[in-house]
Image: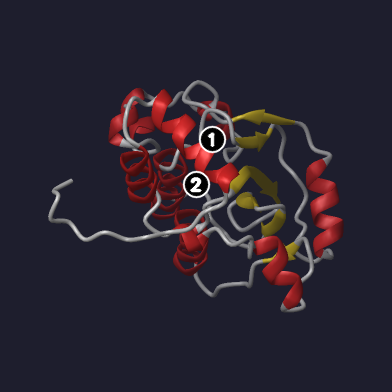
């Protein structure tokens, strides 16, 4: 910082000052530099006000779990899911399930756990049985990978599940929560994809590449 930079006088509690000084000493910099570093790391410190999804949605009369609205197209359903995934900063878990008895024998159910709130998408017709739909599934998984939700936070149900869209959200969530799951990784993805298919298929590395970010390939 330059000596010509403007000064800003600020009163803070003694205990907070002690914490800043201790952190500055640990990081081998001045207290001013410590404060600036922390502000620059969090350019919007007022954003973390505790007004989270789990508190906001009940105020609006939305119960937990909640079923995401139906869409007339798979593209629209995917767009909604990607909007949530890209913009929610507290996704703790993602469940993927292949449900049976749909148009092409299978379709994808997605459950997002965001800040203690469960969002259920169990009516979309996303599948890999047609290439156009497979590209949409690729896009979903690639976005999960891009924000670090694979290899731990995302799991898939190891057997096909029943269609739950006619059930209440609580009934559907309870049923899905009791299904056996496995973590979705680059190693297990072939088992997940084969749940869509009538006969097992050996996916090549080239075919699997589209499901992951370029940085992860």
Q: Residue furthest top?
A: 187
Name the secondary structure under disc 1: helix
Residue highlighted by disc 1:
193
Other-residue count near label 1 (Cα within 10 Å), few / some / many at <14 / 14–19 / ≥20: many
Q: Which mark is residue 129?
A: 2
* Residue 17 visible in the snapshot: yes
Q: Is residue 101 above or below residue 203?
A: below
Residue 206 or residue 58, whichever sits in front: 58
Residue 35 picture quarter: top left
Residue drawn at (55%, 45%) of the image: 16
* Residue 78 visible in the snapshot: no
Residue 20 or residue 180, whichever sits in front: 20
Residue drawn at (26%, 59%) of the image: 7
Name the secondary structure under disc 2: loop
Q: Is residue 109 above or below residue 65?
A: above
Q: Position of residue 9 (x, y in %)?
A: 37, 60
Q: Position of residue 14 (x, y in %)?
A: 57, 46
Q: Is residue 195 above or below residue 127?
A: above
């Amino acid at each position: 910082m330059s000596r010509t930079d403007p000064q800003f006088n600020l009163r803070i509690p003694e205990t907070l000052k002690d914490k800043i000084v201790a952190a500055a000493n640990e990081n081998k910099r001045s207290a001013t530099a410590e404060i600036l570093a922390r502000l620059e790391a969090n350019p919007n410190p007022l954003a973390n006000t505790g007004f989270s999804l789990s508190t906001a949605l009940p105020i609006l009369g939305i119960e937990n779990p909640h079923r995401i609205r139906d869409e007339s197209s798979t593209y629209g359903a995917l767009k909604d899911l990607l909007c949530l995934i890209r913009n929610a900063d507290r996704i703790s878990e993602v469940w993927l399930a292949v449900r049976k008895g749909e148009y092409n024998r299978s379709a994808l159910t997605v459950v997002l756990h965001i800040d203690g709130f469960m969002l259920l998408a169990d009516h979309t017709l996303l599948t890999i049985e047609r290439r156009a739909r497979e590209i949409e599934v690729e896009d979903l998984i690639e976005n999960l990978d891009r924000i670090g939700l694979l290899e731990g936070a995302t799991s898939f149900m190891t057997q096909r599940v029943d269609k739950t869209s006619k059930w209440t959200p609580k009934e559907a969530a309870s049923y899905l929560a009791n299904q056996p799951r496995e973590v979705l990784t680059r190693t297990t993805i072939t088992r997940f994809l084969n749940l869509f298919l009538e006969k097992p298929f050996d996916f090549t590395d080239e075919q699997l590449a589209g499901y992951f970010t370029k940085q992860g390939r």
